[in-house]
Image: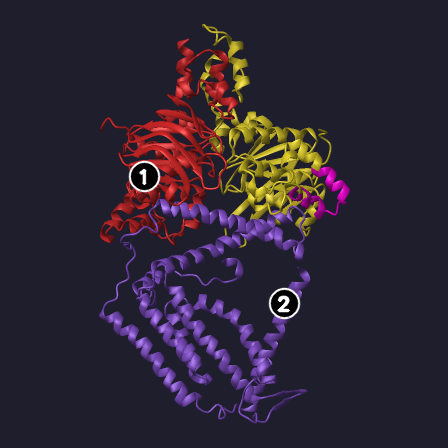
Chain colours: A yellow, B purple, C red
Amino acid sequence: MNPDAPPVVALRDVRYVYPSGDVAALDGVTLEIQRGQVLAVAGQNGSGKTTLTKLLNGLLQPTNGSVAVLGRDTAGRRVQELARHVGYVFQNPNHQLFARSVAEELAFGPRNLGIDEAEVAARVAEVADAFGLTGHLGAHPYHLGFPIRKLVSIASVVTMRPSIMVLDEPTTGQDHRTAGAITRLLFGLRGAGITVVCVSHDMELVVAVADRLVVMRTGRVVADATPREVLADAATLSATRLRPPQITRLSMALSAGMEGPAALTVQELLRDVRASGLDRVGGSG
Amino acid sequence: MGALGPSIEHVRGASWLHSANPIVKLAWLVGTVVFALATYHPVPLLVASIVGLAACVSAGIGGAVGRVLLIFAPLAASILVIQTLAPASCAAPCAAPVALGPFDLFPGGMTHGLSLAARILAVEVVSLGVLMTTHPSDLFAALARMRVPYLLNFMVSMTLQLVPILQREVANVLAAQRSRGMRSSGFGSVIPAFVPVFAGAFERVQQLSISLESRAFGSSGRRTSFRRIGFGPMDVVLASLGLVAGAAGVVAGIVLWNADRTAGTTLPPLLVVAVFVVAAIVFLGVIAAGIRAVLQA
Amino acid sequence: MGDQPIISVANLTVTYAGAERPAIDGIDLEVNAGEYVGIMGLNGAGKTTLGLCLNGVVPHALPAEVSGALLVAGIDPRTRSIHDNARVVGIVFDNPEFQLSQMTVVEEVAFGLENLGVEPAEMPARIAEALALVGLEGVDERSPFALSGGQQQRLALASVLVMRPTVLFLDEPTSNLDPIGKADILAIADRLHSDEGMTVIVADHEVESLAEHADRIVVLDAGHVVMNGLPAQVLARVDELGALGLRVPQVTEFAHALRPDAQELPVTVPGALVWLEAR
C-alpha cells in the first residue's frame, strides 16, 4: 500500500439527516480509506454504520460535507454509475436474488454495466469457481439453502469487478462453516487488491481480516485504529462498548503473567502462553 | 407511509373527538357518505365540509387534516377547470357561457364541478376526522363489536400493517438492484424489483403463520378479546343521530336540492371567471411541477 | 419435580411431505424439568423440526410423517391440538419481525391469551407480567414494527411467555440481532431458567453463551443426535465438532491445543482461568 497514493474514499465532515427525522444519523464524520485496505466498521444498531456505507455508492447523499470516491465527488452521481466502482452487498441476500438460475444472477451485474456477453460468461465462470458455486450454476437461487444464497449474493457483486467492495454484515446469521468460507473470500478480495469496507459486529471476523477498525456511536467515529489497538485496549473498549472476542478476554485476565498487548486469536494466546511458560505444568505443549 | 406525503395516521390527542366512541364516529361517517352521494347541490355539501372541518379544528387536528386536503387541491382545481370548459352535465341547454379571451366558461359546468369537488371534500373531511382521532386498534375493536368476523378483522389489520412493510422492502430491493447497475425504468427492471419482494413476502407469511399457530391461533374454541369497546345507551343515541342525520340529508338532498338538475344555480359571471382563473393557475402549476419531476427522474 | 423427564423422545423420525430424506432420523432425547439444554447443529440439522414437533405444529400444521415416541409433560403432542400444546410449549423463532402481526405491543402479547379464551379481566395483569419478564416497559401502545430488532425479539418472547408454558424452545433467537440484542435475549432465557424454573431449550450458534448457561449440550447433524452431554465434555471434542462444521468456544479451542487428550475442557473465561491455575 502506497501511503502517498490518494485515498480511494474520502469523507469530509459528513453529516446525514434522514428526511423524516431530526436526529443526525451521521454527525461530522471525516474518514479516508486507502486502496487495498480492509476496513471494518462496527457499532451498535443506530450508530450510523450502515448510513455511512450507503454514502459510498450514492444510495444516500450527504446533507452536509462531501464524499469522494476515486477522487471524484459523489454529489449528483447516480447509484448505477457508482456501481461500476463500488460494489454493495446487502445484508439480506433475499433483497437481491430474483433470477431463475445462479448463473443469471451472477451475470446480472456485469450485463447492466454493458459488458459484452463473452466477457460476462468468462467472469461468471471465474467467480463461480472462486466461490465454489460451479456446481450450482444452473440451480434456482431460492432452492438453495440460506448459506449458499449468501455466497451467491456476494459473488453476484464480485462479477462486476468493482475496485471497492462494501459488505453489510456478511457473516451475521451464518453458521460457522459458511462464516469461514466468507472469511476466506474476504482474504481473496484483499489479495486481489480490492478495497473492502465491511460492516460487522462479528469481532472474530474483524480480527481475522481487517487492517483497520472504525467504531461508530451516535453518528460519530469513536475509534479508528487497528483491531488490536481497539479491542485489546481496555480504555478504548469502554468508550466503544464493544465486547472483544472471548480469547481476548481470557488474555486480558491472564495479562499479569504475560508481556505485550492482549491476544486477538487463539493462536496468538497460545504463542504468548508458551512464551511465558504458563503452560508448563503437565501435558503436551 | 410518510414516503407518500402527509400521512393519514392516527394523531394522538385527548379531545372530545378522540375520546368519542369509535362506533359512533363510524356511524356519522356512514351518514355523511350516504348524504354526500345523494346530494347534488354544492352549498349543503360545502356546509357539511365546513362543519366537519370545524370539528377537526376543535379536536386539534386541523393542521394535519389541512395538509392532507392540500393534496386534494390540485384534483379539485382540475375538476373545476375541466367542467367549466367542457361540462359533463348541466342545465340543458347549458346556461350562456361567459367569455374569457378565447375560452367559453360555462357557469352550469362550474356548478357541476363544484358539486363534484364538494362531494369529495365532505367525505374526505369527515373520513380524516374519524381516522385521525381513532386508534386503528379501536376501529377494529369497534368493527368486532359490530360482529364483523374476527378473521376478516385480522386480515384487514394485517394487510394495513403489511403495506408500509412491503413499501420498505420494495425500497430495499430497488436499492440493492440499483447498486448492481439496474436501470430504474423500463421492462427490464420489473422482475428484479418485484421477485425478491414477493419471495420475501412469501417467506414472511410462511413463518408468521407458524408463529401464529404456535400461539394457538385459528384453533377451535372460544376466543376472547383484550380490547373492548363499550356501547352504552348514550352511544346508541349518538350513533343513531349520525345515521338519522345522514338519512335526513339524503331525503333533503333528493327532494330539495337534487330534484331538478335543470335548475342548478346560476353563478354570477364575475365569480365564474374568478374561480376559473384561480383553479386554472393551480391546475397548470401542478402540471408544470409534474413535467419537471418526470424530466428530472 | 417428578422423576419423569418433561420431554422424552425415542426413535423419532420426521419426514416432511414431499421430502426425499427425513429431517429428523431416529433421535432419542430426554430433557428433565428445569433443565437448560443447548442444541447445536448446522442449518438443516433438524433443530427447528424438533421444536415444531414438541408443540404439534408438525404434523398438525406442517404435514409430515412422524414416527417414534414423543412425550411432552406426559402427553404426546400429536394426540392433541396445537391449541392445547401451546399451553405447555412456547417457541420463539429466529426472525423477530416475522413473528409479529398486531397493531400495538400490548395486543401482540394479548394475542395468545385471546386465542386461549382467557377472561379479559385477567389479561392486563398477565400482559404486564410478561412484559416485565423481558424488560419491555413503556412501549405498550407502540407498533411492534417500530421497535428495534432486539426489542421485537423480546416482544416475541413476551407474547409466548404470557401463555405460561412449561417448556420454552428458542430457535436461533439471536441470529438476526446485534450484540446487545443477543446478550439481552440470552440473559432473559437464563433468568427464566434460574429464577422461574422453566425448562429452556436453546438452539443457537452462539456457542460461548450456550456453554456458559446450558446444563447440557446436544449436537445434531443431518437429523441425528451425535453428541449429548455436559458442555465441558461435549465441547472438548473439538476436532469432531470442527469436522461437523461447528465451532467451540475460543477458550476451549485454546485449552484443547494445550491438552489434546483431555476429556473435559473449560468453556468459559473464568473456567479457563481456574483450569490453567490448576495445572
Total numbered labels placed on residues in the image? 2
Q: Quadrant of the C terminus of chain B?
A: bottom right
Q: Which quadrant would residue C54 be assigned to in this image?
A: top left
Say which element carries label 1: helix
Structural crowding at the residue carrying mark 2, measured as other residues with C-alpha within 10 Å and reported as few (<14), some (14–19) or many (≥20): few
Question: Which range of residues does the magenta coloring cover?
Answer: A104-124
- Label 2 marks a residue whose chain is B
Q: Are marks 1 and 2 on the same chain?
A: no
Q: Is residue B182 left or right of residue A231?
A: right
Q: Which quadrant would residue A229 be assigned to in this image?
A: top right
Disc 2 target residue: B290
- Label 1 marks a residue whose chain is C
Say which element carries label 2: helix
Rendering coords of residue A241 (x, y %): 47, 33
Rendering coords of residue C244 (x, y %): 50, 24
Q: Which residue is located at x 72 percent, y 38 percent?
A: A123
The kind of secondary structure the magenta stretch mainly shows is helix
Q: Disc 1 and disc 2: Cα gap in Å?
A: 61 Å
Q: Could you tell me if residue C184 is visible in this image? A: no
Hey, what amino acid is under mark 1? Pro
Rendering coords of residue A226 (x, y %): 59, 27
Hey, what amino acid is under mark 2? Gly
Rendering coords of residue C138 (x, y %): 34, 48
Q: Is residue A116 magenta?
A: yes
Q: Which residue is located at x 56 percent, y 77 percent?
A: B77
Foreground residue among B183 and A51: B183
Disc 1 target residue: C77
Q: Is residue B79 left or right of residue B218?
A: right
Task: Reply above or below: B190 against C159.
Answer: below
